[in-house]
Image (cartoon, rainbow, N blue to C red):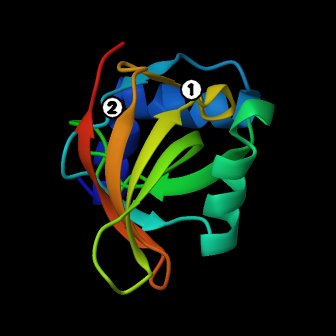
C-alpha cells in the first residue's frame, strides 16, 4: 500500500482532512513537547511588538512540526501571546521566549497544555525549538 493510501486509511487522518474540507471534523488533541521544532516564526519586530502589546493580546504565529503517532512531517500553525523575551546569547538574534499558545480551531486542533511555554528562537533563521511546556 502506498504512503498516501496508508495515511488516508487512518481514521484520524481522514477526520483531519474532512475537517479541513468541511470545517466540521473531529478535534485533535495536540501535545507540544520539549524538542518540538519550530520551522518558521515571526520577525524580530513582530516578537517585540507582541510583547509590547501584551495587554492588547497581540498574537504572533509559529509553524511547528509536532510529533503525532498518526502524522509524519505534519505542520501546524499556532498563534501565541508573547509573555517574555530574554537574550539567549550576545548575538542580538537568539532569544528565550515565554509564550502562551492558543488552540487552533480552524485546523481542528486543541492543545493539551495551556500554560506558559518556553522556547528557543532565532529571529534571523526564524527557527527554534520548544524547551518546556507548563500545564496551567
Tell me: 68 left or right of 106: left
Q: How many marks?
A: 2
How far from the left and from the top, in percent, is residue 115?
39, 22
Mark in the foreground, 2 or 1:
1
- Which of 82 and 18 lies nearest the eye of the viewer? 82
Q: Please report whichever mark, 2 or 1, sits nearer to the chain's N-terminal start.
A: 2
Question: Position of 57 compared to 100: left or right?
Answer: right
Query: Which residue is depicted at the point 58% across and 26% down?
Result: 108
- Location of residue 5 in the rendering, given as x and y in whole percent from the top left corner: 35, 49
Residue to which mark 1 is pinned: 103
Mark drawn on residue 10: 2
Locate the C terminus by quadrant.
Answer: top left
Q: Counting other residues with Cα less than 10 Å from the Cα at mark 2, is it few (<14), some (14-19), or many (20 or more)?
A: few
Which residue is located at x 19 percent, y 44 percent? 34
Q: Residues within 10 Å of mark 1 (few under 14, many from 20)?
A: many
Element on which disc 1 rests: loop
Q: Is 23 situated above or below 36?
A: above
With respect to residue 105, does 13 lie above or below?
Answer: below
Farthest residue toward the right? 56
Q: Nearer the viewer, residue 130 or 5?
A: 130
Residue 54 vertical placement versus 40 (above, below)? above
Q: Helix or strand or loop: what does disc 2 sit on?
A: loop
- Nearer-the-camera pick, 100 or 77: 100
The furthest residue to the top: 136
Residue 127: name its quadrant: bottom left
- Using residue 77 as the reference point, say whether residue 95 is left or right of it: left
- Residue 80 point in image, percent of width and height: 58, 41
- Which residue is found at the position 23% from the left and 53% from the top? 1
Label disc, if present, on residue 84 of the rendered structure: none
Asked whether disc 2 touches disc 1, contact meaning CB atoms under 8 Å apart, the reply is no
Tell me where residue 128 appears, x and y as whole percent: 35, 66
Amino acid at each position: 500500500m502506498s504512503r498516501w493510501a496508508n495515511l488516508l486509511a487512518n481514521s484520524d487522518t481522514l477526520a483531519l482532512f474532512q475537517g479541513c474540507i468541511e470545517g466540521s471534523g473531529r478535534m485533535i488533541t495536540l501535545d507540544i513537547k520539549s524538542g518540538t521544532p519550530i520551522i518558521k516564526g515571526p520577525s524580530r519586530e513582530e516578537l517585540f511588538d507582541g510583547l509590547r502589546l501584551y495587554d492588547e493580546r497581540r498574537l504572533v504565529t509559529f509553524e511547528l512540526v509536532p510529533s503525532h503517532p498518526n502524522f509524519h512531517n505534519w505542520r501546524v500553525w499556532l498563534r501565541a501571546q508573547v509573555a517574555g523575551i530574554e537574550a539567549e546569547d550576545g548575538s542580538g538574534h537568539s532569544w528565550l521566549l515565554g509564550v502562551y499558545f492558543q488552540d487552533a480551531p480552524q485546523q481542528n486542533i486543541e492543545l493539551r497544555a495551556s500554560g506558559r511555554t518556553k522556547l528557543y528562537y532565532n529571529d534571523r533563521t526564524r527557527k527554534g525549538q520548544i524547551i518546556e511546556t507548563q500545564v496551567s
